[in-house]
Amino acid sequence: NAQNGFGGVQRVADVIAAANADIVGLQECSAATTNQILLLLRQMPGYASAQASGAAGVVSRYPITATYTSGGLYGYGVKVTLPSHEEVRFFNSHLTAYPYGPYTIRDGLGVAQALSDELATRHAEMSAVMNQLVDNPFNQPYLATYLVGDHNTPSHLDWTAANAAQNFGITFLWPVSVLIENRGFRDLFRDVHSDPVVTRGLTWSPGYPKNTLASN
């Protein structure tokens, strides 16, 4: 509808198909809505056999053979078998939204406050996801693993000295992205677009002024 964009779940399915995505992590999407998207995708070329895990908010072109969840965590995961018969893991997380670190810095509350908030919320949440799901020896941590999500925090790779002018004059080692990197993950966006000055890693906000969304 007009308040939430246009096209509804059909538009979501269209975007996934247009991107020719193999595995997609959905955010703020119920199991019922995930299934709606799956049914729409199955009508499109290349997705007739697609599967979904409502528990993990994941839609996959290829078979989902396991789902990893644990009560109280801010993340979920699945295991997927690719056409090559290789098994991979795909984790999808959604961390606490507020207090949002860049707003804290923007509003003059200081880096120390932003760091304290990060450690108390998102860093603690991602640590639990890593410890209990991603690195859990029962979840085959040796498999190739992808991590996506709405982490509600910037990346330290986007807050370097080179582009401090874009970030309130601040250079900041955001704890969540540092934690993920230290666990052996690579930021694929920054692998492709290595210069944060030329290509900013912006995903927020979807519209400006507030509540204004693009019509195409």
Image: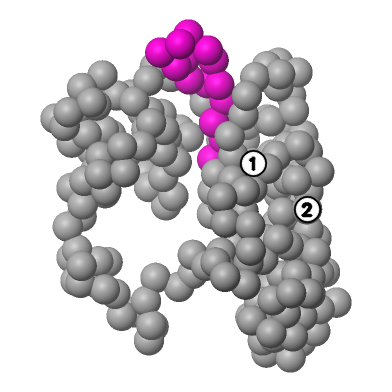
Q: Is residue 30 left or right of residue 133?
A: left
- Taking depth in this image into account, of 120 and 38 the one nearest to the observer is 38
Label 1: element kind = loop
* Residue that mark 1 sits on: 73
Residue under the image location 22 percent in, 34 percent down: 41
Magenta region: 79-99
In the displayed structure, 215 sits above or below 143; it is below
Image location of residue 152, percent across then percent down: 59, 62
Image location of residue 8, percent across then percent down: 20, 55
Q: Is residue 116 left or right of residue 153?
A: right
Residue 93 lies in the magenta stretch: yes
Image location of residue 151, percent across then percent down: 60, 55
Residue 206 lies in the magenta stretch: no
Give the amino acid at mark 2: Val
Quarter of the figure that contains the N terminus: bottom left
Residue farthest top in this picture: 85
Label 2: element kind = helix
Residue farthest left in this picture: 43
* Residue that mark 2 sits on: 178
How many neighbours does mark 2 have within 10 angstroms: few (below 14), some (14-19), or many (20 or more)?
A: some
Residue 26 occupies which quadrant of the picture?
top left
Residue 34 occupies which quadrant of the picture?
top left
Mark sitting earlier along the chain (1/2): 1
Q: Is residue 151 left or right of residue 120?
A: left
Give the amino acid at mark 1: Leu
Q: Is residue 8 left or right of residue 109?
A: left
- Taking depth in this image into account, of 194 and 215 the one nearest to the observer is 194
In the displayed structure, 103 sits above or below 133; it is below
How many neighbours does mark 1 have within 10 angstroms: few (below 14), some (14-19), or many (20 or more)?
A: some
